[in-house]
Amino acid sequence: MKDYDKAEFYYQKDYELAKRTGDEFAMGYALHHLGRIFRLKKQYERAEQLLLESLAIRRKLGHNTEIVYSLNGLAQMYNDQKRHREALGLAKEALELCRSEN
C-alpha cells in the first residue's frame, strides 16, 4: 500500500518539531524522507529542493553516512529523470565518501 500522503503528513510533523527544537540531525532526516516521498510521487522539483536542503544540513553537521544517503537519494531521482550524468556524479561522490570512511 502506497500511502504517500500519510507519510508526508508525519514526516512534515517530524520536521516541524525538529525545527522548533533546533534538532538539525532530525531536520535532515525528515527532509530526506520528504524528498523521497515527492520523488515517488514524481514531483521532482519539490523532491530535489528537499533532498538538496537535507544534503546541506548533513554536510554542515559532517555526518558522512547521512551525506551518502542524501547523495544516493538525489542520484536515484536524477536517474528517474534520465539525468544520468548528474546521477553518476553524485553516485561517484557517495562511493568516494564511503571509501574514505574505511
Image (cartoon, grey):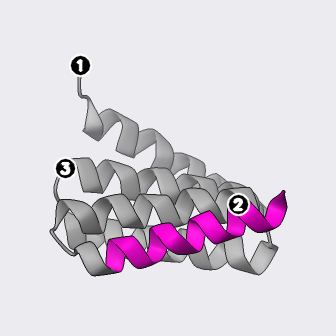
What residue does disc 3 label?
41
Q: Measured from the top left, where is residue 69 in percent x and y? A: 57, 56
Ranked by sequence position, the earlier of labels 3 and 1 is 1
Check residue 1 in the rendering and tell me which mark sits there, or answer none.
1
> How would you rate the neighbour count of disc 3 (Cα within 10 Å): few for under 14, some for 14-19, many for 20 or more?
few
Classify residue 102 by image quadrant: bottom right
Q: Which mark is residue 98?
A: 2
Q: Distance between the residues labelled 2 and 1?
A: 33 Å
Does the magenta segment cover residue 92?
yes
Q: In which quarter of the image is the N terminus?
A: top left
Residue numbers of the magenta segment: 86-102
Name the residue furthest top. Answer: 1
Mark 3 → mark 1, Cα distance in angstroms: 14 Å
Q: Nearer the viewer, mark 3 or mark 2?
A: 2
| Residue 65 at x, y percent in the picture | 72, 56
Image height of 39 relative to 46, above or below: above
SS of the residue under disc 3: loop
Instruction: Locate residue 47 relative to residue 57 in the image: left or right.
Output: left
Q: What residue type is labelled 2?
A: Cys
- The image shows residue 62, relative to residue 27, as above or below, that is below
Residues under labels 3 and 2: Cα distance? 29 Å
Q: In the rendering, at what x and y percent does residue 71 appear?
A: 51, 67
Name the foreground residue: 63 vs 35: 63
In terms of secondary structure, where does tag 1 sit?
Answer: loop
Prevalent SS, magenta region? helix
